[in-house]
Amino acid sequence: MVTMDKLVSLCKRRGFIFPSSEIYGGFQSTYDYGPLGTLLKNNIKAQWWKAVVQQRDDMEPLDASILMHPRVWEASGHVAVFNDPLVDCKECKARFRADHLWCLTATHRDESKQYAVEAGEEDEALSKGRELHQIGKRWEVSAAPMVIDAAEGTPQVCPKCGAAGSFTEPRAFNMMFQTQVGPVEGSIAYLRPETAQGIFVNYDNVLTTMRRKLPFGIAQVGKAFRNEIVTGNFTFRTREFEQMEIEYFCWPEQSAEKHQEWIDARIAWYTRLGIARENLDLYEHPDHKRSHYSTRTVDILYRFPIGFAELEGIANRTDFDLSQHAEFSGKTLDYFDTKTERRVVPHVVEPSAGVDRNVLAFLTEAYTEEEYTDQKGGKATRTLLRLHPTLAPIKAAVLPLAGNREDLVATARALAAELREDFSVQYDDTGAIGKLYRRQDEIGTLYCITVDHQTIDDDGKVTIRDRDTMQQVRLAKDEVAGWLRDRVR
Ligand code: ATP
């Protein structure tokens, strides 16, 4: 399993992801996607659009604005309840989400100790505790939510510095970023904390202009902003991120079935694009964790280097959002079926995925270090990204084998230009072939195409090397584009 450090280092070294504002020392867990990261991210989004809109007849795309009427966020509940309980350690000043602090009790024969860890879920807290105490030594570890209130008598130990009894009282912290609109002070707006509300407020526009009938859905990709108390784990949790969201509107009695269909469809999408099923897990939200209006919420978890964590959430949100917006805007947001004369506020299923977490998941899954036998029969190792053909940022690299021969270079450049009509292609003549192969493997390039003396002087064929098998085939130069088209779909 790849570590986060290895991923971060590859991303930086090979131009996938850079710390933002790096020349100023970086800025608070913000990241910039470099040339290859941009291509990978765009490919992921393109595959999502293709699967959730193009290949279905019940979906419409949308691109709503980031700034919206402030009342939207009152209706959605974000002004009132988009709060996390925040506590600070008075000693080391570390800041925590109180609901992410766990008190662990480790018991070993007649000895027992308590300490605190930071983790999002109980399972995660327990596995951290077991790691600390190594199961082999027969420590029994149990986890309970950390009670910050001293009256409860639970030890309030800071997981960072170990200071006891040093937390501030938890206080509600609204995670929406506020900004001012225009020159008039006091006219505030929020940077959207999710893209979903842009869909709800356009429900009626899309319904009527596209002459839709229930069930139908609207899909959107865009930036969202949350002033998270604690960021970290590379791009897993940042304050600015991108979401791919769907609101699927249906009859109330259809919603449970549609919810399950979307869970299945989204899992199938991830596995089709190369994520192993055993690296995905489902987390069924228990009653006490679910929003009061949701009848069922299921998270798709991925085995990130930090352990299983949320990649996408799929909620059955009933008629909550449309009813709220109808009430707050005074506009009717229901659906009338002329045939049956039935009027309802549609129920909504919401599959909501993070683009950045998708990038991280696909990189984690693709990262491979393997031993192979080199041309001289010796053992060598290489790092490669086994990305799905549709996701690989670069589909082919054209590599001339004798960079000093003008006619050979011209042929290689012409081939690269021809392939660029349809694919992202790199041309590279800056090193020995072994080094060029390793560089391309590391960024997941599907095929390396070498142009050599034989191509020019003899058969007009080039050698194509497969990233995963390292096997080579020789093919007429003119057939390469068609050959590639058959394989990159
Ligand atoms: P978490 O529990 O991890 O904070 P959430 O349940 O609040 O996530 P949702 O509101 O369901 O997340 O958002 C949908 C998706 O958006 C998540 O599954 C995740 O992929 C992504 N996402 C949410 N918050 C962040 C963030 N701070 N950084 C990166 N991606 C995020």
Image (cartoon, grey):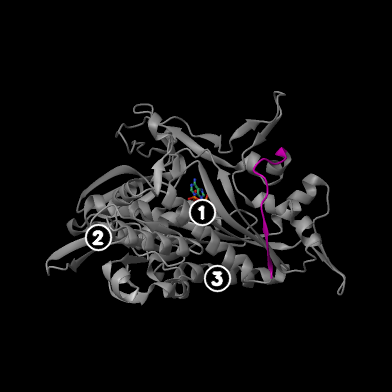
In the image shown, does 431 or 4 lie closer to the viewer? Answer: 431
N-terminal-most mark, 3 or 2: 3
In terms of secondary structure, what is the magenta stretch mainly? loop
Identify the residue position indicated by label 1 in the image: 354
- Give x and y (percent) for residue 347: 70, 63
Q: What residue is at 40 percent from the left and 46 percent from the top?
A: 17
**Vertical placement of 292 versus 93: above or below?**
below
Q: Which residues are magenta?
A: 58-70
**Per the image, is 64 magenta?**
yes
Would the CB of label 2 be found within 8 Å of ligand 1? Answer: no
Q: CA distance from mark 1 to mark 3?
A: 16 Å
Q: Residue at x 24, y 49 (%)?
A: 132
> Taking 56 as reference, is 422 left or right?
left
State the image quarter where residue 109 is shown: bottom left
Label 1 close to label 3 by CB (< 8 Å)? no
Q: Give the amino acid type for the residue marked by disc 2 in the picture.
A: Ile
**Quick check: is 330 in the magenta stretch?**
no
Q: Amino acid at mark 1?
A: Gly
Reply above or below: 277 against 101: below
Q: Secondary structure at mark 2?
A: helix
Q: Which residue is mark 3?
A: 265
Q: Is mark 1 within 8 Å of ligand 1?
A: yes
Write down the residue under mark 2. Answer: 433
Q: Which mark is residue 332?
A: none
Q: Amino acid at mark 3?
A: Ala
Q: Please, is residue 13 above or below residue 422 in the view?
A: above
